[in-house]
Image: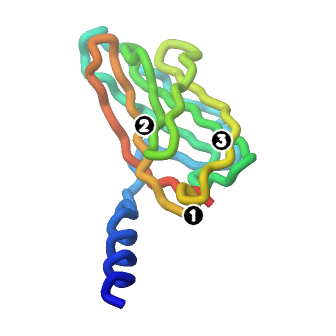
Amino acid sequence: MLFAFAVIVTLGACEPKPVAAPSNFVVSANAPLALPSAPVLAPNAAPRLIRIWFSTLTLQPGMWFDGIIVASTNVASVEVRTAAFSINATHAAPGIFRFHTRVLELPPLSRRHSYELHVIARNTAGEQTVEHLTLEVK
């Protein structure tokens, strides 16, 4: 009985704590019609994440997951990462990154969990800025 309790406590401890969504984050089924402009920054300036739009924060196998990230113009790459997967967003224009991906079937142990999701913007020098969100996988 004590072993079962220890397993339950241990599994509960593995769940990430809910993360408050940053003020620059929007989740909606449809992409926004208007996006803010990407601020022009020097190449060596710290990267900035201006607006993050995701189609959802609850994923199920077989569905599409979309995102648009507006960053400063000195951002060279944007990565959307969890413990279960990583997406490298396509650089569409200066400061504009997009992704459109189908959610693949995940192993049973990876499903029905919350994951901390990291949106990572990096400049060419490798300096990064990170926003944290909570993602549900059904």
Q: Secondary structure at mark 1?
A: loop
In the image, residue 121 sits, relative to residue 106, either above or below, namely above
Residue to which mark 3 is pinned? 65
Looking at the rendered structure, the kind of residue marked 3 is Phe
Looking at the rendered structure, the kind of residue marked 2 is Val
Q: Nearer the viewer, residue 123 or 62?
A: 62
- For the view shown, which residue lies furthest in the bottom direction? 1
Residue to which mark 1 is pinned? 112
In the image, residue 15 sits, relative to residue 102, either above or below, namely below
What residue appears at the point 30 percent right and 9 percent down from the top-left corner?
43
Could you tell me how far apart the alpha carbons at marks 1 and 3 are, in whole angstroms?
A: 17 Å
What residue appears at the point 51 percent right and 31 percent down from the top-left corner?
69
**With 18 as the anchor, is 45 left or right in this view?**
left
What residue appears at the point 49 percent right and 13 percent down from the top-left corner?
94
Q: Nearer the viewer, residue 32 or 45?
A: 45
Residue to which mark 2 is pinned? 119
Q: Secondary structure at mark 2?
A: strand
Is tag 1's residue or tag 3's residue first in the polypeptide sequence? 3
How dense is the environment of label 3, judged by Cα within 10 Å: few (below 14), some, or many (20 and up)? some
In contact (CB < 8 Å): disc 2 and disc 1: no
Q: Which mark lies nearer to you, 2 or 1?
A: 1
In the image, residue 74 sits, relative to residue 116, either above or below, namely above
Q: How many marks?
A: 3
> Which corner quadrant holds the N terminus?
bottom left
Q: Secondary structure at mark 3?
A: strand
Looking at the rendered structure, the kind of residue marked 1 is Arg
Could you tell me how far apart the alpha carbons at marks 2 and 1 are, in whole angstroms?
A: 21 Å
